[in-house]
Image: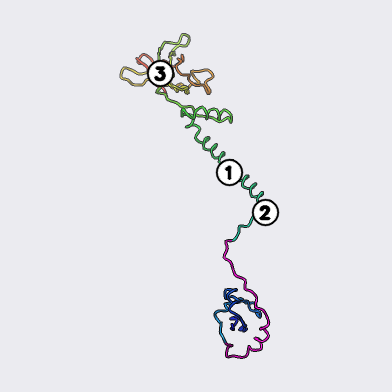
Amino acid sequence: MYTQCNHCNAIFRVTMKELTAAQGLLRCGECDNIFDAMKNLSQTLPEERRFAQKLVKMAPVEIQEPTTIEHTTPKSKRLPQDLKHKLSNARYFISIIVGILVLLLLLQVLYSNRHWLAQQPITSPIIRQLCTLVDCDITPYRDIRKIRLLSRNVYSHPNTPKVLTISASIQNEATFPQPYPLIEISFLDKNNKVLALRRFPPEEYLQNSKGKLMSTGIPDELLLNITDPGDEAIRFQFRFM
């Protein structure tokens, strides 16, 4: 039997045994092309005799056993040990950097919301302790509705004419310490018209009032001086601000 290379048209004599062993695939001895010998297989030579001389030359040459192509799953290449070590170190440093960035973001959130967090019963101790360590300010929580006026009295100043002295006792009934209030005192006539009004900030009625907070459940005694509004004033009132 004869077959012909589909690339260079070289003619070869083959046997069925050779074709069966190579699964029909042969390698051309002229152009080294692998071709399917079964497609051009015939019992006689082609009509064209221009390849006859080439056939005589190729007849003694043994046909090489074709190499079958096995469809196998490619094996994964192993990385060199030093490359694996470098990748492991890179992942380690990236994890550290990500952790630091997350921590900084958390601290930024805590710092930005420290005033609100300091007013919450659960987070207040932690936030106050952190602010003590890093020296940051916290606006204390205030609830002036919990400040109670226990007693009040007004009388003429013993040494200064036309000046009234007001004594008062106030108490913080909240469950937490809070800043001292701004106290507004107004004098009214019989028609409830305001004749005189003055507001006293904490530094005017307290000593060393900076940063000082009202303790819970402990009365504070105050003395306030105000100009006498005259005989038309028949009553006065307190207001906390």
Q: Residues within 10 Å of mark 3 (few under 14, many from 20)?
A: some
Secondary structure of the residue carrying tag 1 is helix
- Estimate the spatial distance between the alpha carbons at disc 2 and disc 3, rounded to whole Å: 78 Å
- Which numbered circle lies on residue 70? none
Does residue 156 belong to the magenta stretch? no
Residue 57 shown left or right of residue 74 in the figure: right
Which residue, given by chain and number where applicable, does mark 3 sit on? 148
Tag 2 near tag 1, CB within 8 Å: no
Q: Main secondary structure of the magenta part?
A: loop
- Counting from the top left corner in percent of width and height, residue 171 is at 43, 17
Residue 67 on the magenta segment: yes
- Name the image quarter holding residue 208: top right
* Residue drawn at x 46%, y 29% as measured from the top left: 120
Q: Quadrant of the C terminus?
A: top left
Please give the residue where the numbered disc 2 appears in the rendered image.
80
Q: Is residue 17 visible?
A: yes
Residue for point 46% across, 19% down: 216
In the current view of this chain or complex, which residue is farthest to the front?
A: 17
First-in-chain label (2 vs 3): 2
The magenta-colored residue range is 44-73
Residue identifier under label 1: 98
Q: CA distance from mark 1 to mark 3?
A: 52 Å
Can residue 224 be seen here? no
